Amino acid sequence: MTQKKNNEKLGGKDLINIGIYAAIYLVIMTAISMLGFIPIMMPMLSVLCPLIGGITMMLFFTKVKKFGMITIITIIIGAFLWVTGMGFWPFIFGIICGIVADLVAKSGDYSSKKKTVLSYGIMCITIFGCFLPLYLDINGYFSTRTSFGSDYVEAMTRIFRPWTAPIILACSFVFGVLGALLGMHFLKKHFEKAGIV
């Protein structure tokens, strides 16, 4: 019993894996986010980040065997988005989505492909937190970001109409699922070796 409890605790190797894959994912996310300087590309971040980041995160999921790893990496992603100016909502979403995603993966004993796909899709909902301020108070959001210019703000206001919120939310999840499936396709041997079926 004691040995089992020890095996369930996160060790140094687990934390190293979290750090490595978080760093890689954040670099990918940052590179894609540069497209956000083009107004029409901003909503596409809810598509491209989950989709392209899926390969990296699926490799991470092959390392996950303990509860907490998915929670921590999702919180790190949310915290990074907060620190880099996306507001506190991604951090809050990161905590909630991270725990739920971890519980989903754990329900499949971290060895179910279906649960892994669902888990990553839930993780990606964290990205929606970046867009939430644009729906809650877009003028307040850009009042501290005057360097963007009035033309950019007007374009964003036209794009982020209230009715687009559920679409952005759905895209974050759906393309997370597709990103997971894409990652699994490219990393088939890794999943077989990890015993994820």
Image: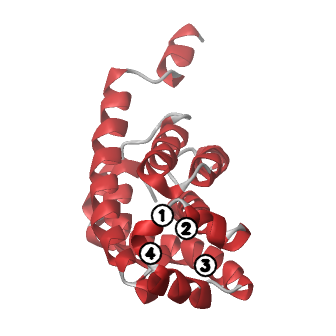
On screen, residue 179 above or below 4: below
Q: Which residue is mark 4?
A: 45
From the viewer's perspective, is 157 left or right of 20? right
Instruction: Please report contact status of discs 3 and 1: CB closer than 8 Å, yes or no.
Output: no
Residue designated by label 2: 142
Using the numbered discs, state the Cα–Cα distance from disc 3 to disc 2 in whole angstroms. Answer: 20 Å
Q: Residue at x 31, y 58 (%)?
A: 56
Q: Tag 1 or tag 3, which sits nearer the N-term?
A: 1
Mark 3 or mark 2: which is in front? 2
Amino acid beneath label 2:
Phe
Disc 1 marks which amino acid? Arg
**Circle 4: element type:** helix
Q: Nearer the viewer, residue 151 or 39?
A: 151
The amino acid sitting under disc 4 is Leu
Amino acid marked by disc 3: Ile
Determine the CA span between mark 1 and mark 4: 19 Å
CA separation in Å, label 3 and label 4: 9 Å
Around disc 1, counting alpha carbons within 10 Å, would you say few (fewer than 14), some (14 to 19), or many (20 or more)? few
Q: Could one spot residue 195 in this view of the protein?
A: no
Badge 4 density bin: few <14, some 14–19, many ≥20, Cα 10 Å: many
Mark 2 and mark 1 residues within 8 Å of each other at the beta carbon: yes
Comparing marks 2 and 4, which lies closer to the viewer? 2
Write down the residue under mark 3.
168
Mark 3 → mark 1, Cα distance in angstroms:
22 Å
Q: Would you say residue 58 is visible in this rendering? A: yes
Instruction: Please tell me whether residue 67 is drawn above or below residue 34 in the rendered image.
Output: above
